[in-house]
Structure formats: C-alpha cells, structure tokens
Amino acid sequence: MGLLYLAALVVSLTGMVVLDRRFRLFFWVAPVRAAIVLVVGVAFFVTWDLFGIGLGIFFRGETSFMTGIQVAHELPVEELFFLALLCYVTMNLYGATTRWSSSRMRQHPASGSAEGSSRRGTRPRIETREGETS
C-alpha cells in the first residue's frame, strides 16, 4: 500500500510522456529546451516547498499510501514526482494550446482578408428623428 501514490504519479507521468510523443507537444519538439524548463520548474517549486516548510506553512501528510521516504525534513519523495508531473502537464498544455491557436489562426485569417475588406469604408446607416438618414 505504501507505493500506491508513487505508482499513480509514475503512471501519470508515463501518460504525459505518451501524449507528448503522440502529439509532439514539448519534449519531441525541442528536447533541450523542454529539459531545461522541466528542471527549472521543479527546482522552483522545490525551493517554494522548502521555504514553506521552513516557515511552518507546509507539513507532510501522514497516509498509508505514501512510502514514508523523505528527501528533506517534511519533504516526501513523492513530492518530487508530483512537481515533475505538475510541470510536465503545464508544458504539454502549453504545447497543445500553442498548436491549437496557431492552427486556428491558419483556418480563420485576420479581418484584413478579402471577405472582411468589402465592407470597409462604409458607414452604418443611422436613422434620426422624422425618418432622416445620415
């Protein structure tokens, strides 16, 4: 039972890798950049956690689903896998939304296209009192 949470995190990370490979979202587009982003992101959040632990804000929760192995005081090993998953999900989401928005821009060009330019320069008709138009 003690490895259940860690196993769930590893399965989730594996799913992120499969999605990334299948859709070429982040690591399969620029592996060096993705590795740097992942390492910096995890390092940032570990630092955040350590400050929170030092200030007495964060505590390790006691549960039978965790291994009980601590990397530092009040910092379980599962936290590192969780932070890696958090960063990987964010990177994949960024890659997917970037791809989606760029494909959408190609499908629906800006208002400067031929369809949108035919009405340029025309003023809408505004009716005033007594039926006059301007």
Image: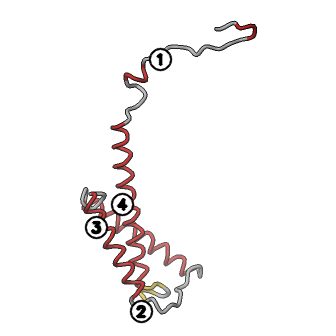
Give the label on residue 2, or none.
2
Label 3 to label 2: alpha-carbon separation: 26 Å
Judging from the image, the colouring scheme is secondary structure
Total residue callouts: 4
Kind of residue at badge 1: Arg
Kind of residue at badge 3: Val
Is 73 positioned to the left or the right of 57 in the image? left
Q: Which quadrant: the C terminus?
A: top right
Q: Which residue is mark 3?
A: 18
Tell me if label 3 and label 1 are in contact, CB under 8 Å. no
Instruction: Identify the mark nearer the N-term, 3 or 4.
Output: 3
Instruction: Identify the mark nearer the N-term, 1 or 4.
Output: 4
Q: Position of residue 67 (x, y in %)?
A: 41, 91
Is 129 positioned to the left or the right of 70 in the image? right
Q: Which mark is nearer the camera, 3 or 4? A: 3
Kind of residue at badge 4: Asn
Instruction: Identify the mark nearer the N-term, 1 or 2.
Output: 2
Label 1 to label 4: alpha-carbon separation: 40 Å
What crowding class fits label 1: few (fewer than 14 Cα within 10 Å), some (14-19), or many (20 or more)?
Answer: few
Q: Position of residue 17 (x, y in %)?
A: 29, 68
Give the label on residue 92, or none.
4
Residue drawn at x 39%, y 58% is 93
Give above or below for 28 relative to 84: above
Q: Secondary structure at mark 4?
A: helix
Kind of residue at badge 2: Gly
Q: Which quadrant: the N terminus?
A: bottom left
Tell me if label 3 and label 2 are in contact, CB under 8 Å. no
Give the label on residue 120, or none.
1
- Comparing 118 with 46, the one in front is 118
Q: Position of residue 113 (x, y in %)?
A: 38, 25
Tell me if label 2 and label 4 are in contact, CB under 8 Å. no
